[in-house]
Image (cartoon, rainbow, N blue to C red):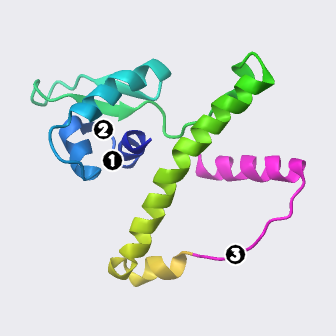
């Protein structure tokens, strides 16, 4: 998830630049390994740019956002397991990114700090309202 997130933030990248962005020490072998696995899940794809050093391996995110299609699973248990795995593997990198933002917030331009918001609101929505709100947010982002 961290590799995928790095590619979504700074797309496309080399294995070395992903390693630097994730602050991982050399060698970048684990990143290369995972990048070889992620195309099978249609999460990333290898690029073949013509204007760069051919020894570098370039990658990009397959799509700007990852949506799990739980409707393709055979059983309700499989749908739950697939969704649960994705949500849990996505949660930690999101938390870490927010922590990095908070740790570096004083270096962020004041206008951006003022534009942001933080609250502890609890949304009390029905399932239908939750579905519509999620759809509205996705449409706004797209």
Distance in Å between CA atoms under marks 1 and 2: 6 Å
Residue 93 coordinates in the image, percent (x, y)? 46, 52
Residue 60 falls in image quadrant: top left
In this figure, which residue is indicated by the disc labeled 1?
10
Specify start and end residues of the magenta stretch as a single range: 117-142
In this figure, which residue is indicated by the disc labeled 3?
120
Q: Looking at the image, is mark 3 or mark 2 nearer the viewer?
A: 3
Circle 3 sits in a helix, a strand or a loop, which is it? loop
Mark 2 Cα-neighbour bin, 10 Å: few <14, some 14–19, many ≥20:
some
Mark 1 Cα-neighbour bin, 10 Å: few <14, some 14–19, many ≥20:
few
In this figure, which residue is indicated by the disc labeled 2?
12
Mark 3 Cα-neighbour bin, 10 Å: few <14, some 14–19, many ≥20:
few
Residue 132 coordinates in the image, percent (x, y)? 81, 49
Q: Residue at x 80, y 65 (%)?
A: 123
Relative to 118, does residue 72 appear above or below in the rendering? Answer: above
Q: Is residue 35 left or right of residue 124?
A: left
Relative to 109, does residue 68 appear above or below in the rendering? Answer: above
């Amino acid at each position: 998830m961290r590799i995928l997130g790095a590619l979504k933030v700074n797309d496309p990248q080399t294995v070395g630049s992903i390693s630097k962005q994730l602050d991982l020490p050399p060698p970048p072998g684990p990143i290369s390994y995972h990048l070889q696995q992620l195309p099978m899940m249609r999460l990333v794809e290898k690029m073949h740019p013509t204007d760069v050093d051919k020894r570098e391996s370039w990658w990009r995110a397959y799509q700007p956002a990852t949506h799990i299609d739980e409707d393709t699973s055979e059983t309700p248990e499989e749908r739950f397991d697939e969704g649960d795995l994705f949500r849990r593997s996505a949660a930690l990198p999101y938390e870490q990114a927010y922590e990095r933002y908070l740790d570096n917030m004083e270096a962020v331009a004041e206008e951006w700090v003022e534009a942001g918001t933080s609250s502890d609101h609890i949304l009390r929505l029905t399932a239908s309202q939750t579905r519509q709100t999620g759809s509205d947010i996705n449409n706004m982002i797209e």
